[in-house]
Amino acid sequence: QSSVQLYGMIDIGLGSFQRPEEQVVGGGIINDWKRTAKLDRNNEQTSYWGLRGKEVLSEDLSAVFLLESFFRPDTGELGRFNSDQMFTREAYAGLASKQFGELRLGRHTTHLFTTSFLYNPFGSGFGWSPTIRHIFSGNEGKVRGDSGWSNSIHYLSPKIAGFNLSVMAAAGEKDTGNGGLGVVEAQSFMLSYNAGAFSTTLTMQDVKVGAASTQGRSQVTGMLAASYDFGLLKLSAQYTEIADKPTGFEDRIVQVGVAVPLGRGKVLASYGQDDTDSTDDTTLKTLSLGYNLPLSKRTDITVVAMRETQEEGVALAPNANSLRNYGRFISGNSYGFGLRHRF
Amino acid sequence: QSSVQLYGMIDIGLGSFQRPEEQVVGGGIINDWKRTAKLDRNNEQTSYWGLRGKEVLSEDLSAVFLLESFFRPDTGELGRFNSDQMFTREAYAGLASKQFGELRLGRHTTHLFTTSFLYNPFGSGFGWSPTIRHIFSGNEGKVRGDSGWSNSIHYLSPKIAGFNLSVMAAAGEKDTGNGGLGVVEAQSFMLSYNAGAFSTTLTMQDVKVGAASTQGRSQVTGMLAASYDFGLLKLSAQYTEIADKPTGFEDRIVQVGVAVPLGRGKVLASYGQDDTDSTDDTTLKTLSLGYNLPLSKRTDITVVAMRETQEEGVALAPNANSLRNYGRFISGNSYGFGLRHRF
Amino acid sequence: QSSVQLYGMIDIGLGSFQRPEEQVVGGGIINDWKRTAKLDRNNEQTSYWGLRGKEVLSEDLSAVFLLESFFRPDTGELGRFNSDQMFTREAYAGLASKQFGELRLGRHTTHLFTTSFLYNPFGSGFGWSPTIRHIFSGNEGKVRGDSGWSNSIHYLSPKIAGFNLSVMAAAGEKDTGNGGLGVVEAQSFMLSYNAGAFSTTLTMQDVKVGAASTQGRSQVTGMLAASYDFGLLKLSAQYTEIADKPTGFEDRIVQVGVAVPLGRGKVLASYGQDDTDSTDDTTLKTLSLGYNLPLSKRTDITVVAMRETQEEGVALAPNANSLRNYGRFISGNSYGFGLRHRF
């Protein structure tokens, strides 16, 4: 009997992208909306490989472990970005009791990221999911502390009357290991209720980050999400608030999504809006439309069209000190094809 | 049924080497021919480990993936050199049709490297193969763009009347991820014909590289190669031309090789000559003689003696501005033992 | 029949630590004994994953290989420390004869590290084992050349009349690949005798290291170790001497340990003392008390309390040039819980 499983997923595709990639130009930041046609990775889901295992210790108790590593299949590089580390998707060992739940120690995917990808039709894809793009990429509205927390304790309750509760705490040490995304101290909980076609989750997190430039920064984020599967279609919705101190900016992010079975696949649609209240009010609107076709249980292809629009609430003329395109309405259209293979 | 295979190869040995390792000394480049006896890796073949899988989707169609990572077993380090990345041997996912051929997206071994190692008795070994040494290592004669292309599309035809055609194109993005070896834009094809004991391949590639120091560089390389297995011996030959713009240098590289079954193993002999036409004409001559003994299908040992000679066509006295040994006839003899184990 | 095994071990826990972590402060070095409560890894044993295989070539001969990679499960990072490399635990291929012994080429765990962890109740744990802490961590008393040697040849004899002999030599090349811990040239042997409940080992190593700051440094280390399993308890003892040139410091390190079966687990106790004779005499005393409880053959938990005391033989007042706490008696108490899972 083997004690370890080797598995993973590779996501690669082609597309024509017109996305607001941030670039530092001459001391300022400029949003670059120029179109690029390229072979690209990780738009549907971030590729990874991993090792995991479970050892039954008694009728109630098991030991569990998991090590998962992101990679970029278009270049063969490790991680999600250049300074990313080996097993940053998740890395833990723990004990699982059927009766009392599961306790894991190590690095864990945050509850906020889990709730973000579970309740939108485009899942965890940084390429196409409005929710993931608004909350986990971009700059001003970005949630602090990465999508995984190092040095954390993760408790997952058993299911009780349809409810699941998870609690996570990252210990008070400085995590400088992951490209400056590290967390100094963080807590979160995720409370889910599942009954037949209905599912809902409430998640809250409080993060203190430690990069030198953001000393003393504390950020509280809450998300309420729900989905209902009518059979003919599945609806999902998410409402998120981010309150960032001491910068004082606030984000309100909404998403509504629908997945409609059609032929052997599904039509996917998701609209998200991200309103940032800060010294420069910004609204980011993203609409993604796609079709996902499973070729098997393990392999699928996806085609997507996405329109992303950025509206600046405060109209400022571009100037030397601020190269951002304030006062301009900017938008981009992206199109992509992706192949996803689980192994 | 397992969906993933874990496999690889480790090549390690001992030797006494007198090879022209380039060193930057005081602002110039000097070829150092001093003798070193050492435990060394990757002379027969570059060690690697990998994951691959194939999923049958229908009678005609399969999904395929592959992730392969080089390593250096003498130090335990990742990659071929210090700035190398995780899965740079190959990393792709794709769809394979028996009828229409295979399409792969990701990072792929170039057609030029494949043709280089298939038609010489010392294969892909950077230690002993004259062809690999002349085309892929060294400085002036070196082919641009690494032996694998990131961000590339690779199509492989089915075999039709003995012919196979492969076409590869690397998309127009800057690949800065792999130690400055990255490709900006590249295309190649490989046309092979196999019939019984006879095999021949024509390969051409056009590469534009993007390192700041080589902006605008474009390089076209063609190789014609053939082999014939007479039973008593197997002959192979390769002719290669490299035309590099705007530096204007041209390389002509020839190789003739023979493998003769003897006892349980094979005697291997390969002679290669690399003529570079540039401002400083150089001729590099390499003769390798060896014996390869399989201990099993998966394990073999090899002993090799190699003589490498560098002749400078234009006789220049060494001076402060150019520390290269111009005008001198220099040569070195290397001897090695290697153990190769496939797993 | 599979030709490769995938396996490893993950060690993670919680603790309150008061350990002398060295910090460079304002140009001097200060020992920081402040207490930190945190989720921590690798205190019982350094986590790793690996690939290994064995191929039977004949009745007597097999081919073997092994690749093992350390990692840090609390952050998901590769290696033991930031500049560590991929397969630094061990990486080799070799040939194993039942009659004549085994020859391995690559990177190998040193005989000194092996003898250090085999004869103390806390094994190879950098967190709790006095022997490992005194010999392989810390600064002045530290053994040179890492716990593994790159570019080395390792011969292991078969067992003859209860005796095993291993000999290792690292070739004369500069190994700069592993965070400055590299060895320039090194030799060692390990002679063991095992008969029933009694075991003893003599190990000696001679290391020349190559970091720029330690040119010409040569260090000779010898360890004599023994253990006897009385059934009711198992006693172990180690005596080590390190002579370092040209710095002239000498270390004498002793350890006595006992493991007492109690319930389903074992009570563990180890006392070690490290006397350094240098310009500033230092004595480091470490006492660890613990209980190890196996939950299965593959999973165990450990609780440990450790008291570490540093006495400075030469009483110097703290000053601007030397921020070390000379003349002060300093000590710390640490407590920890750990979960170890082998897969």
Image (cartoon, coloured by chain):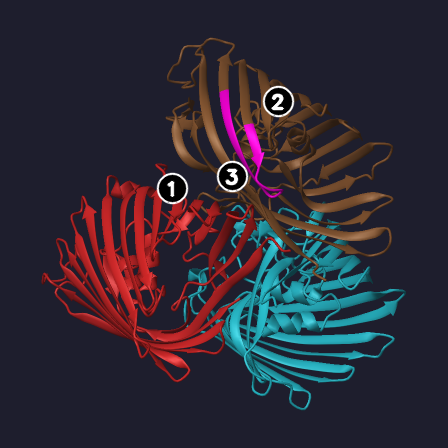
Chain colours: A red, B cyan, C brown
Q: Residue furthest right?
A: B263
User: Quick check: B153 above or below A102?
Assistant: below
Which residue is disc 2 drawn over?
C246
Would you say C82 lies left or right of B233 here?
left
| Nearer to me, A10 or A254 | A254
Q: Nearer the viewer, mark 1 or mark 3?
A: 3
Q: Is mark 1 in CB contact (under 8 Å) with mark 2?
A: no
Q: Residue furthest left?
A: A315
For discs 1 and 2, the disc positioned in front in the rendered view: 1
Circle nearer the viewer, 3 or 2: 3
The answer, for residue B335, to whether it is visible in the render is no
Sequence-wise first label, 3 or 2: 2
Q: Residue type at mark 2: give it.
A: Pro
**Chain letter of the residue beneath label 1 in the structure image:** A
- According to the picture, the residue beneath numbered tag 3 turns out to be C339
How far apart marks 3 and 2 lie (CA) works out to 42 Å
Q: Magenta stretch mostly in which secondary structure? A: strand
Please determine whether, in this image, residue C282 is positioned above or below residue A313.
above
User: Is residue C319 within the magenta segment?
Assistant: no
Q: Which labelled disc corresponds to residue C103?
A: none
Circle 1: element type: loop
List x then y, in percent, for residue B279.
56, 65
